[in-house]
Amino acid sequence: MQKEAETIKPIRSLEDAVDRCQNLGMRLSRQRRFILELLWQAKEHLSAREIYDRLNQQGKEIGHTSVYQNLEALSSQNIIECIERSDGRLYGNISDSHSHVNCLDTNQILDVEVELPAELLAQIELQTGVKITDYNINFYGYRQKQDN
């Protein structure tokens, strides 16, 4: 059974993410803040290992277990994004609805806002009998080669 849609302010900044943690009564530990800051600075999708490595390279000592536990807590509350891939999970800073461009050369995932025409959504609803309330699209492709 699906819960009724709640109007929750989208997270568009580090401050929004911190506010959401506080509104949910989540303790904003030093480690949790480090992870949020890194994801907002990086503006890319990172594995738990990459997050651990980058934080420790910045001199922000944090253990593996702490990284995993905080990522799980933040993603389970929809404060950060968690993408399941065949080679593991990736985490990103945008938690509200959006689409992705998957670069097959670099395995990079780029966030994009895509708005489908109302006519197309109406056509899909007509074909399926399902009222579309949200969507995300995954695009796949290769970087365009550039002359050096």
Image: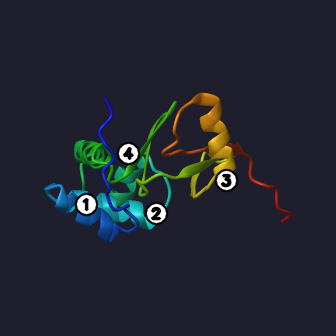
**Viewer-proximal residue among 51 and 69:** 69
> What's under tag 3, amino acid-wise?
Pro
Determine the CA span between mark 2 and mark 1: 20 Å
Determine the CA span between mark 3 and mark 2: 31 Å
Q: Which residue is mark 3?
A: 117
Callout 3 touching callout 2 (CB < 8 Å): no
Q: Which element is circle 1 on?
A: helix
Q: Which element is circle 4 on?
A: helix
Badge 4: few (under 14), some or many (20 or more) residues near its Cα, within 10 Å? many
Q: Which element is circle 3 on?
A: loop
Badge 2: few (under 14), some or many (20 or more) residues near its Cα, within 10 Å? some
Q: Which residue is mark 1?
A: 20
**Viewer-proximal residue among 49 and 113:** 113
- Return the disc, 4 or 2, that comes first in the chain's sequence: 2
Q: Is residue 48 above or below residue 85?
A: below
Determine the CA span between mark 1 and mark 4: 21 Å
Q: Is residue 13 above or below residue 140?
A: below
